Amino acid sequence: MEKAKKLMQIQSSGVVAVIRRQRPEDVVPLAEALVKGGVTTLEITVDSEQSYQLIGEVKKRLGSTALVGAGTVLDAETARTAIQAGADFIFSPTYNASLIEMAKRYGVISIPGVLTPSEMVEAYQAGADIVKVFPASAFGPSYIKDLQGPLGHIPMIPTGGVNVENIGTYIANGAIATGVGGSLVNQQFIDDQDFESIATLAEQFTEAVKQARTESES
């Protein structure tokens, strides 16, 4: 799939599910449940057990129905390893120019973590495809709205503290998507092997995104 199509898929889904430090045997059924609920962009953090292997396994199982990327990537070498494992995108908590360069070299989507306007501009000028506004909870949805005037040309994915109650506000305020962790990847449901409830949660998140977009257009 071409990078442009992948970027469109990230925006269409509106939700990036953060899969962090789960038992390897739970990751595939978890991913399947998320996709069943409409969340088709999945981040597997590299601090997870067997992370690179799992990226490949999930991609093989889900095919073109989902994008599978690597998260918590801190340096270019880790990015290269993840890309070799098949990662569709590289999600980082910080801005690192060499990491963006590595992703560009292989034609992979780069999403570095930033917080200030200066960091956003610098990362975008360095070639970032999207910026991850992290931690979004530090300023809340209104921060994304404030940024849209001067920096509306930079695609933003706020991450940190996003839940089903506020995701719609982030989207309405200009975010192309949001990164969502524990409020979607519910640990109790996973421990109980209740993946159907994960799918239901995913549906609630995707419905909130759709509703926010519909209301913004009206």
Image: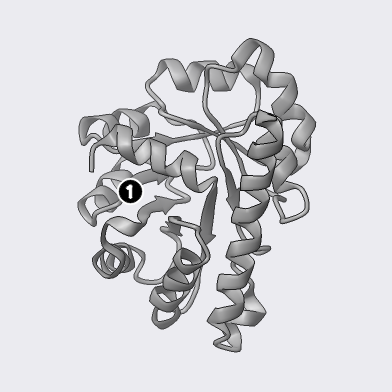
Q: Quadrant of the C terminus?
A: top right
- Give the total of numbered labels: 1
Q: Quadrant of residue 158?
A: top right
Q: In the image, is residue 20 above or below residue 22?
A: above
- Given residues 157 and 215, the one toward you in this image is 215
Horizontal side of 188 relative to 73 (left or right) equals right
Q: Amino acid at mark 1?
A: Thr
Q: Position of residue 199 (x, y in %)?
A: 55, 71
Task: Give the residue at x 70% y 47%.
Answer: 167
Q: Which residue is at the far front?
A: 218
Q: Position of residue 140 (x, y in %)?
A: 78, 38
- Given residues 214 and 164, the one toward you in this image is 214
**Residue that numbered label 1 is attached to:** 78
Q: Position of residue 164 (x, y in %)?
A: 72, 56
Q: Quadrant of residue 201?
A: bottom right
Task: Give the residue at x 69% y 31%.
Answer: 216
